[in-house]
Image (cartoon, rainbow, N blue to C red):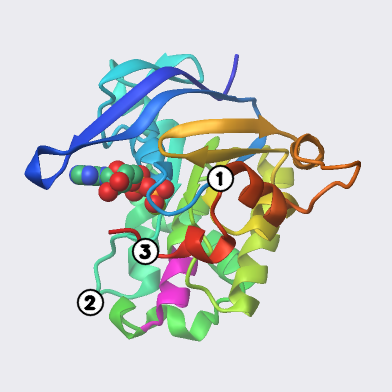
Amino acid sequence: MKALELKNVDKSFKKRRGEVVRALDGISLSVGKGEVVGILGPNGSGKSTLVRVLSTLVLPDAGEVEVFGVDAVRHPKQVQRMMNRVSVEASFFKKLSAMENLLYGSKLYGVTSREARPRIGEILDNIGFDRKRATEPMEHLSRGMQQKIALARALLTSPVLMLLDEPTTGLDPRSKKDVQAFIRKIRTAHDSSILLCTHDMGEAEELCDRVGIMVDGKILALEKPDELKRRYATNGRVPDLEETFMAATGFSVEEASAEKE
Ligand code: ADP
Ligand code: MG
């Protein structure tokens, strides 16, 4: 059984002036147990929509979505319990501290404060978050620090499936390295299956078993990073992932990370 299986998934949105955007256009994708699959794509290519469909926040218009064999459209509650999503728009109780938010997060997954406390300390150390700041209100923390707490919250419950939507976007280089190292660690320690959406080529290459390139709601290729690069070789020269991305999408890396709209 696969951790994730999508078949021909479509999702369109109506924009102002009646224009329709196909955010997901016939997406088929599978992620094996313990596998880390990266989706590289420019802004607006549909990565977050893919993650929202998987986390049952958005209903697909068509297609099949299964998480560990469970139909995500028919059994959203069951599917939600198996996964955790980390995205840039993580929501917190801003007036409460990081610790309080984390304790609350564990409670939602049935983990008591007594069990959660030591584990929270350990996770905070691991991601390079100063424990002393864990008692300050969330709103006093930088975005990078808040992002680390979002990740810590997801890790606390050792989910079998993690959906990481640009987990290191907006982090300083040091925090980025901490978070990436921690993702690698979880993966070996918990054997979690991970879908990682990013526009960071280095991150995709370093963390993922397979990398897919997404443009305009379609996944153009999904392979091991080496194979992906070889596919775009010209005259026997194998490009790096950045060049591969440009060749596949027609976007430069700068354009890929620019805000759309
Ligand atoms: P990415 O995460 O790759 O930047 P998104 O999945 O956020 O891409 O967006 C894909 C496309 O779908 C974009 O054109 C975006 O504007 C559109 N879109 C996403 N969510 C909505 C929504 N709730 N309503 C209208 N359009 C949306
Ligand atoms: Mg996004």
The Cα atoms of the two marked residues, 2 and 1, are separated by 42 Å
Near mark 2 (Cα within 10 A), the count class, few <14, some 14-19 or many ≥20, is: few
Residue 189 x, y percent position in the rendering: 71, 46
The Cα atoms of the two marked residues, 3 and 1, are separated by 16 Å
Q: Which mark is residue 259?
A: 3
The Cα atoms of the two marked residues, 3 and 2, are separated by 29 Å
Classify mark 1: helix, strand or loop.
helix
Give the dominant element type of the magenta stretch: helix, strand or loop: helix
Classify mark 2: helix, strand or loop.
loop
- Identify the residue at image location x=29%, y=25%: 60
Which image quadrant is residue 126 in?
bottom right
- Residue furthest to the front: 235
Residue 17 x, y percent position in the rendering: 8, 44
Q: Which mark is residue 95?
A: 2
Which image quadrant is residue 63 in?
top left
Using the image as rendered, state which of residue 215 and residue 66 is in the foreground: 215
Q: Which mark is residue 249?
A: 1
Q: Check mark 2 vs ligand 2: CB closer than 8 Å? yes or no.
A: no
Near mark 1 (Cα within 10 A), the count class, few <14, some 14-19 or many ≥20, is: some
Residue 53, compared with residue 121, is above or below; it is: above
Looking at marks 2 and 1 on the same chain, the residue that comes earlier in the sequence is marked by 2
For the magenta stretch, what is the residue range? 141-149
Looking at marks 3 and 2 on the same chain, the residue that comes earlier in the sequence is marked by 2
Mark 3 residue type: Glu
Nearer the camera: disc 3 or disc 2 = 3
- Identify the residue at image location x=75%, y=40%: 232
**Quadrant of the image containing the C terminus:** bottom left
Mark 1 residue type: Thr
- Residue furthest to the right: 236
Residue 216 colored magenta? no
